[in-house]
Image: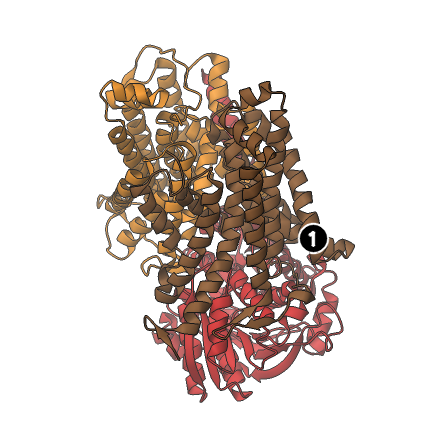
Amino acid sequence: MSLSRRSVLGVAAGAPLLTTSLSFRKARAQAQNTIRIGVLNDQSGVYRDLSGPGSTHCARYAVRESGITQAGVNVEVIEADHQNRPDVGSTVMRQWMDRDGVDVILDVPTSSVALAANTLVRERNKVFLCSGAATSDLTGPACSPNTIHWTYDTWMLANSTARAMVAAGGQTWFFVTADYAFGHALERDTTAFITAAGGRVLGSVRHPFPNTDFSSFLLQAQASRAQVIGLANAGADTTNAIKQAAEFGITRRGQRIAGLLVFITDVDALGIETAQGLVLSETFYWDLNDRTRAFTRNLGTMPGNIRPSMVQAGCYSAVLHYLKAVREMGVAAAKANGAEVVARMKAMPTDDQAFGQGSIRADGRKLHPAYLFQVKTPQESSGRWDYYRLLGETPADRAFRPMAEGGCALVRS
Amino acid sequence: MAGPVLEPGQAQEGKPGPFGFTRPQFALFSAMAAFFAAAPFLGLYEVFLAKILCFALFACAFNLLIGYVGLLSFGHAAYFGMGSYVAGHAAKVWGLPPELAILCGGLIGFALGLPFGWLAIRRSGIYFAMITLALAQMVFFFCLQARFTGGEDGIQAIPRGVLFGVVDLGPDRNVYFFVLAVFLAGFLLVHRIVHSPFGQVLKAIRENEPRATSLGYRTDDYKLMAFVLSATLSGIAGGTKAIVFGIATLTDVHWSMSGEVVLMTLLGGLGTVFGPVAGAAIIVTMQNYLAGFGAWVTIVQGAIFVVCVLAFRAGVIGEIGKALKLRL
Amino acid sequence: MDMIFGVPAPLLFGQLVLGLINGAFYAMLSLGLAVIFGLLNIINFTHGAQFMMGAFVAWMLLTYLGIGYWWALLIAPVVVGLSGIVIERLFISRLYKLDHLYGLLLTFGLGLIIEGTFRNLYGSSGLPYRIPPELTGAWDLGFMFLPVYRGWVVIVALLVCLATWLVIEKTPLGATLRAATENAALVQAFGINVPRLVTLTYGAGVGLAALAGVLAAPIYSVNPQMGANFIITVFAVVVIGGMGSILGSIVTGFVLGVVEGLTRVFYPELSSTVVFIIMAIVLLTRPAGLFGRA
């Protein structure tokens, strides 16, 4: 009997656990002089291409560029797949921080997992450098002294796209909105900016989420004769909508499509034929200037032979800046107090190849300019990854939500 | 179509022990309880163990339906996920202590299970599976849009709270032993139900429904009761998970969660006493250690389904039981 | 603008026509399920993955071999159908003597494997596939613009459904099939190779799913998850229509597409759940489905 018990519980579940827990202990012993960075993102689902192994690649590159290893500090970058599931992500993070001596959680696309990371990291006084998630709550109601929201957020996307579009002549808008909290918030924010900039919203239509057939919604948008059709949705919904908009020849008839949450990887997936004319905001484009081009060149071959997305570039930028603060404080102090590292990071100006010069605000918001791009036509493009034409720029001080409006408790006190 | 008959458990009965266990079963149960009680002191990680126990309870609840009534539900994520949402909401917004929050999770499982079960038991077999799947999909869409679930952000930072106003569940070890207690209670409850006269009627229905009807049993009532019990326990499992992890999200109501609990139970052994626990332990461990392998998790899960169905229908525990000629 | 029930007429007609198009996909997928269920008595959970494979094969033909849409319409269903035949021979055929639920579990597992494999190979952001030049543009119907491709989808779906129905109901082959459904042993006794008939039927049902996949490729995002979301709705359609009824699955598919379209006009919030609500009502009143026999 006891034999079968062991064969079931011991072999099936216990044994792999025991061995790994032993290796944890060994790891803990040698971890004293090692900074451990845990890249937690989507390695298998919809965000794989824009974060995934590319983010790890960029983080490792940042470690090399920082030259910190030569200064006698070991930095280890490990990665895991949260499968877009908060429970999986949460278990991984707890083990990382409680057992494996991980000091930094990096990237974390999918807002549900990012918000969970925000809480867990704060409880343990570690550091959370968020590049992949979009929710502005991270620097608003959920802001934390241990978190820096690096690359972008929904407020910035809505603001940049709306203001720059209105300035570029897109006066009237019609929204195609995903019918859940995220879509509603995006539409509401964007509407406020359009009105503030002197534009007008003619109407909106809500589609179920997820949805495959957008033809009817697009027909309504087309019938509104608005100059700009704003897509307040994300992921496969957005790509489906853009694909079907191309089918209806909406851009050919003079209306412009503005994607409120579109990444370069989406454009690549759609193909430039389909995506041409699409307008979108990002904070980084590999072919933006000499420094970004140098950055992309120095990265070497990315996994999957892609160009870095803004999320991946953000991972590089965040790690580089973090290691500067670690160098200043010393490894022991940095490992002991995550909030202190973040305070140091906020005190120093940032400078790197991908985002140029910038700074970090008291509420944990990293500041840098936002760019409005239009997808080139196939004739303009010289080949794969030559996708964007710059339409406008929002300077760093106006690109993100003013601190007073976010409702961050760190700032009020 | 006759009621679905999944391999009936062997008929051989040992001497009855406490809670209706046979003696070998009771020995195994004691060993399992001892293992889980000792596990944190062996260096195993508490939160991880707690996760295994939450899913083990979920799988036991599911097994009650498939293993003893022969009904395959493909929509149990609805009860598990709603249990998790409601418990999270109760603990965070209403400020209820964890024991009451989890009870709320069970209540919502009950409240959903009653109408859904009433609808679904009108059909059996494949139809039953598809109907439960479709109903669960409705719940998913509801959770996506309802305000209190927080959409795709989910409910975050749910406090673990203080149990009965005495025990602070904040430390991982405390919460783990609380979960262990919930799990053992649920496990014994399922076992007790199965071995009660009520459970005997369920088995009679599984073996031959027309015969049970002709003996004067209102089989639909029995099936519905089993369904509701299973849904309630699933809600409790979901609520417990929400308290342990401090989050409740769409993952728990998604149809892939329904698939996962089927997988756990199938792998461990449909209709076995300990199978669901073993299945949950294996699958959760696998998900954890395959976290670095991307889409391979899906492929491996699919492969386990295929292998189990083709070559291994009794599951891990079932096969061991066959080899030892015991009902485990 | 003309108003009907307080809704602008173009919007209403637009949604009606577009619902019909969605219905075309529902009909083709539920038809495949019904054909397979009729003879094999299993519910093919792999159907969504096979729909996705159809779209991917079309993409591969174009990308690797330069073979365009028109040939893909023919080749992709055959390729995916053949893969279905392999699956049936290797796996499903071993389960006929067991409870039908095992068939469901097996095909569910196979679906996961296929989806995971495609995700490993091609990522999940989706792949580009364009509408063939002959079918671009739109017709001005007066009350709305109908993209030519959508019209094409509806026509093809109707023709395919009609052809399948005719084959099963009006030809000697169909008669054999129906007889085998009723009593396989008897048909076998007449010297007909029933196992081969079963294999070919599964291949044909899968081929239908793949054909729907090719039709979907130019308008829907081609990604590994594309079938998974569709298939649950299609299951509800099958339950409503009554399983095993060929005509039932076709009619229900189209009708539910239209109902869904109308819901989008009058109460958009309900449009993703309306099919499931109808399913519940049908179960209450006619447990065997609208066209099913109890």
Looking at the image, which residue is at 54% across and 33% down? C106
Residue B217 left/right relative to A359 = left
Colouring scheme applied when the structure was drawn: by chain
Q: Quadrant of the C terminus of chain B?
A: top left
Q: Residues within 10 Å of mark 1 (few under 14, many from 20)?
A: many
Q: Residue furthest right?
A: C65
Rendered hue of chain C is brown
Provide the letter of the chain coloured red. Answer: A
Looking at the image, which residue is at 50% across and 20% down? B319
- Which chain does the residue under circle 1 lie in? C
Kind of element beneath mark 1? helix
Q: Quadrant of the N terminus of chain B?
A: top left
Q: Is residue B256 visible?
A: no
Quarter-of-image position of residue A293? bottom right
Where does label 1 land, which residue? C72
Question: At which x and y percent is residue C22?
Answer: 50, 57
User: Is B269 rendered above or below residue B88?
Assistant: above
Q: Amino acid at mark 1?
A: Ala
Residue B158 left/right relative to B269 = left
Q: Is residue B123 visible?
A: yes
Looking at the image, which residue is at 58% across and 74% down? A283
User: Is C56 rendered above or below residue C79?
Assistant: below
Question: At which x and y percent is residue A47?
Answer: 56, 58
Quarter-of-image position of residue B15? top left
Provide the letter of the chain coloured orange. Answer: B
